Amino acid sequence: MENQSPDRLEAVATYASDLAAWKRHQRQSELETRRADDEIDEEEREQLEERGLSTDPSDYEDVPSSGAYITVKTTKQTADTEYRYYYWQWREGDSWKNEYIGPVNPKE
């Protein structure tokens, strides 16, 4: 890089800046798409509240107040049964974090 002309270095810097902006936009778009695909709907949210399970992230110690959403995860599946649970989910750096809420179908 030291041997490049100032014009060439400015072109590289502009390209790098544009590429970084594009990557940020792509990542945000992917996060929004995943959230739209995974997030529970309002009816499920109301059912959780009726069961006494909070849908407020501030009621959970490790869940961030913004960016977290409730999703359903299947942890195990057999021929007869699906083991499905509600989790808070959010992005933290390059990884996904989860916090358990409760089963989708509690035993009566």
Image (tube, helix red, strand yellow):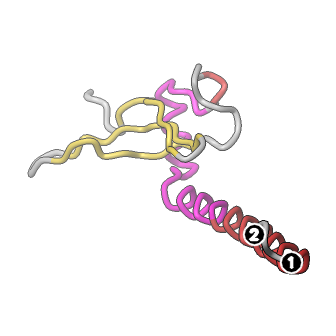
On the image, the x and y values in percent for residue 1 come to: 75, 68
What residue is shown at x 90% (from left), y 80% (from top)? 7
Residue 41: say if magenta: yes
Q: Is residue 51 left or right of residue 85?
A: right
Residue 63, numbered circle: none
Amino acid carrying label 1: it is Ser
Q: Magenta: predominant secondary structure element?
A: helix
Q: Is residue 45 left or right of residue 85?
A: right
Label 2 residue SS? helix
Find the magenta span and give its range: 27-55
Residue denoted by label 2: 16
Above-or-below relation of 9 to 79: below
Callout 2 crowding tier (Cα within 10 Å): few <14, some 14–19, many ≥20: few
Q: Of callouts 2 and 1, which one flags the residue occurring earlier in the amino acid sequence?
A: 1
What is the C-alpha distance between the residues marked 2 and 1?
A: 16 Å
Amino acid carrying label 2: it is Ala
What residue is shown at x 31% (from left), y 31% (from top)? 106
Q: Residue furthest left?
A: 79
Residue 38: say if magenta: yes
Above-or-below relation of 89 to 54: below
What residue is shown at x 62% (from left), y 60% (from top)? 32
Residue denoted by label 1: 5
Above-or-below relation of 55 to 96: above
Check if mark 2's residue and mark 1's residue have beta carbons within 8 Å.
Answer: no
